[in-house]
Amino acid sequence: MARAAGTVGALGVVLAVVGLLPWLSGRDPALTVLRARSAEQEATPEALDAIRADLGLDAGPVTPPVRWAAGLLRGDLGTSWVSGTDVLPSVVTGLRVSLGLMGAALTVALIVAVALAAPVLVRGRGTSGAFAAMLAAVPEFLLATVVLIVAGVWLGLLPTSGWQGPAHLVGPAVALGVPAGGLLGRLVADALPAVLGERWVELWRGAGVSPARVALAALRRALPPLVPQFGMVAVGLTGGAVAVETVFAVPGIGRTALGAATSQDLPLLQGAVLALLALGLAVGALAALVRRRLLGPALRDAGLTLPAAPARRVAPAVPAALAAVLAAVIGWGLLRDPYTVDAAARLAAPSPAHPLGADGLGRDVLARLGHGAAATVGTAVAVCALSWLVAVALGFVPRLTSGLSDIANALPPVIAGILVAAVLGPGTDGAALAVALISWPPLAAHAAALVQEVRASGFLLAQKAIGAIPGWILWRHVLPSVAGPVARHAALRLPGMALALASLGFLGLGARPPAPEWGLLLEESRAYVERAPWAALAPALALALLAGLAVALSAAARPTRTTRRSPHGG
């Protein structure tokens, strides 16, 4: 009951804020709609008054959302303010396209995830995870641009735009699926070593059970806490693919929502957001059902045995080497001027004068990379730490937050950024808040799954039976079993948070040009990535190094069996 109330409340708040967007932003919706309908028509007072009367805007900000909600109860999503057509067909068409793209991208993601997890299954021990983290940090829109140029323009293997058949799925699916596969593969690979170190694996192998069957059983054992992550990735691939949909001109639901927000077409925006939120709730419920089926009666009977803490530590040389390279590049860049424009050096290749080349205005890429590190990495780290704290706290009250988590996860970063900017105004703080609002759900879902399994473990039941006080159980057993895995998960998402901040900055909702912010460097270089790829590769590689460093550090700091006993005494 509490979950349903929280879900309905969060859904109502989001839709209400969306309905009040023009008034929160301070922009005249009549003028925006007039420009969207006809850019040539003069914005006379008479024309604006006619639009206000036609749309009901003259009755105040509350009337349009109330009318839309009343129509929603009758199954009517309203009429587009810009095109004058019914909203429902546009929403259904966009959602159908995005679901098809989601299916193809998930297929690519699963292939990548299996490739990353397979070596762990074969060797029985984990890795640093740096390579998987670097894959997860690949900017989707940059990968989409590269695929478009190489496979579409140079080789002619794929269509460059549109949505007419299966061939149009390949490019967007690769651009979305590779980073998602890096994330999922790392999460699975992080969970497998503890499972493969359990006694039953040794007994099965000694009894002659085939390696394939042991591997499948280990996967089934490791997957329950991660099932919600698969669901959230699927939802993110549906509504969060705005940049990739834009590059390939895919008419998906995310691009539809962004276009409606830009033109302040409230009925279409509300319909698109409602579809995304409904999808998030449906996928969240399905993931919860699958997880309970995987756990079986042990969850109900408090008979779970938790995997032991993995014993392997990453050699300190791995994070040290990554940190040294990243620090050297940033430090070198800080010694140079990021704003000097040299027209003669426009798109110059790397040279002694410009070690990482120059951008489209002739500015030194190395200097801009170094000076943008504080804004990009510092803000992303702060958002990541805040999301981790919120997730660990909310993991103990999943009934109150699971519905809210599904809704927050279904909201694309661009839409969240637009809503926050409408209330607070554009700026770095608003962009950070927008990313923070949508970054905690995957971490909270992971924490809630781990908390539920710890509470249902037979060991914890024994602790209660011998009289251990709740505070001791919480501090000594529950928190160590939850905080560490969620922290490693948060570190894996750190570059994604940096990219989300960057995308909002490009849209005018965060850092603005000529700020030397890494995301802005990526977006500014996308237009000439074919002629001067170094301008895009520099910030992309910096993000990849950041991802590898974050995950390697978390792995190096992971406790071993000699430093902390596992929750079941292993």
Image (spheres, rainbow, N blue to C red):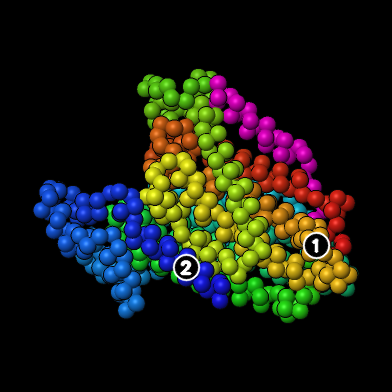
Where disc 2 sits, the SS reads: helix
Q: Main secondary structure of the magenta part?
A: helix
- Residue 357's spot in the image, x, y percent? 48, 27
- For the C terminus, give its image quadrant: bottom right
In the depicted structure, whether residue 502 falls above or below residue 31: above
- Residue 5's spot in the image, x, y percent? 51, 72
Q: Is residue 384 left or right of residue 555?
A: left
Residue at x 42% of width, y 62% of height: 14
- For the N terminus, give its image quadrant: bottom right
The part of the image, by quadrant, that contains residue 348 is: top left
Residue holding disc 2: 9
In this picture, which residue range is highlighted in magenta?
308-335
- Residue 304's spot in the image, x, y percent? 78, 72
* 135 and 229: which is toward the camera: 229
* 394 and 525: which is toward the camera: 394
In the depicted structure, whether residue 506 falls above or below residue 486: above
Residue holding disc 1: 473
Residue at x 47% of width, y 65% of height: 10
- Label 1 neighbour load within 10 Å: few <14, some 14-19, many 20+: some
- Label 2 neighbour load within 10 Å: few <14, some 14-19, many 20+: few
Mark 1 or 2, nearer chain start: 2
Q: CA distance from mark 1 to mark 2?
A: 33 Å
